[in-house]
Amino acid sequence: MKTRGATKLGLRAVDLYRGSSICDNLEFVRKSQYWSTEELEAYQSRRLQELVSHAYSHVPYYKKLFDEHGIRPNEIQTKKDLVRVPILTKKILRENLNDLVASNAKRFKPTKRSTGGTTGAPLTHFSDINTWSMHWALKIRAWTWAGYYWGDKIGVLAGSSLIPNSHPPITRRVWNRINNFYPMSAVHFDSDTMEEWIHLIEAEGIKQLRGYPTSIYCLAKHLVDSSRTLSIDGVFTTAEVLQPAHKEMMKKAFNCVVIDSYGCADGGGNASTCEMDNGFHVSAEASIMESTDNFGNPVQPNETGEVTLTNLTNFAMPTLRYKPEDLAIAKAGKCTCGRNLPMLERIVGRSTDVLSFANGRMIGGPAMTLIMRNFSLEQYQLIQNQADRLDVCIVPLSGFNSGQNEQLLKTLSHHCGEGVNIIIHKRDYIEPSKSGKFRFVINNMQR
């Protein structure tokens, strides 16, 4: 059996390789999850005060914003004071990206990153090395709630090998090897692909699965339909809303704890269910997560509100009261597991359809976001009305030319498989749904 000593030694090696601080952050969050509510809030207040002072002194966007609204940095002391700060939307972030980067950002070792674009358009932001370290520490902490130790073999059913004939960079391959990650491309798959996954899992002794809920659900259903199970210790889902029926299918196929996670890299948001499955524990060490109405005012527990995030770790590009366009329901009280982190009843937004074609191919929504972000598009929407056809509506940016159009068709054809007619429609604008949320993958055949 692995020990925490072995875990710590392995993580120290990763930190040495990456120049990160995952190990220190992990030791911290293992302790802080059991702090009292008062201790957690005091920690958040200290970090918030440091962040606001830094943002006013080094970030042009916030210097201008605070001055225009008559806000003094020393007036933002606790999360209750944040209501005075205007909301930061994705549109504002895109239009003010350079002014949101701190003048001394290099001190924090920033990396330019791009989100998958769950609302239909990728988003560029900068994240510093401490934010990246905390991000991984919180992932590992949540996985340990299902018995994981660092170094356990994890099968990753997510966005590997997305583009035809492409290969992951050497840094990604080294990272996978260090962490014992076994990528299993879940962009498109069929029954033969899932049999290959099963063979790999059994041959390598993989005991943990991580990936998109729809992908892991399809594997679980494939097993149950053929009256089989797999010996798995823990399943970790992310990027989509995990549907209750899908979770039950996973438990039936794998007979293990399912840890579902919410993450917002651009806003620093993080929350995960635990072994008790009583809702999501919000990672208060990484961000202040509010649930607000359309005007940025707090909503009550048990009411649906917009997730609003203040990243407490990213000093390279501070984001105060950032709305990633996700919906959640806050929950009063504490979990029976003994952890004192704030709670969410559930995540409401980010649910996506699965495209399913007559040739047996299936493609989940998160995989599509990773494919589409490689093209110069302001918006996109994929609509399936027939088993052998996919309509792709796009709002091109200036960089989208005939070459990109041809490559988009080629890439989609590769993933959708033979016999699927792909039609690209160029638009000036794509309307959101009646609820106001933008759906970027729509399978009308599932309704």
Image: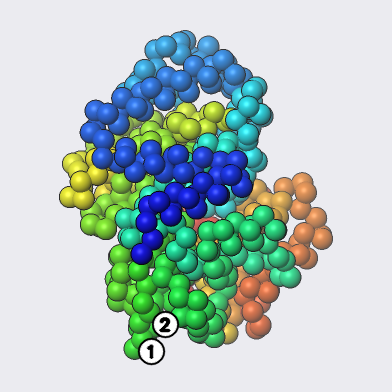
Residue drawn at (46%, 80%) of the image: 202
Label 2 close to label 1 by CB (< 8 Å): yes
Q: Does residue 198 sit above or below 163 in this rendering?
A: below
Image quarter of the C terminus: bottom left
Left or right, 222 with reference to 116: left
* In the image, farthest residue toward the bottom: 226
Q: Position of residue 316 (x, y in %)?
A: 59, 30
Left or right, 5 with reference to 11: left
Disc 2 crowd, CA 10 A, few/some/many (<14, 14-19, 20+)? some
Residue closer to the observer: 416 or 338: 338
Q: Which residue is under mark 2?
A: 222
Left or right, 11 with reference to 391: left
Residue drawn at (55%, 49%) of the image: 13
Q: Position of residue 42 (x, y in %)?
A: 31, 25
Q: Position of residue 20 (x, y in %)?
A: 56, 41
Q: Residue 214, can we see it?
A: no
Disc 1 crowd, CA 10 A, few/some/many (<14, 14-19, 20+)? few
Q: Position of residue 191 (x, y in %)?
A: 51, 84
The secondary element bearing badge 1 is classed as: loop
* Amino acid at the residue labelled 2: His
Residue closer to the observer: 169 or 376: 169
Q: Which residue is under mark 1?
A: 226
Q: Does residue 421 sit above or below 75 in this rendering?
A: below
Residue closer to the observer: 294 or 243: 243
Residue drawn at (65%, 22%) of the image: 103
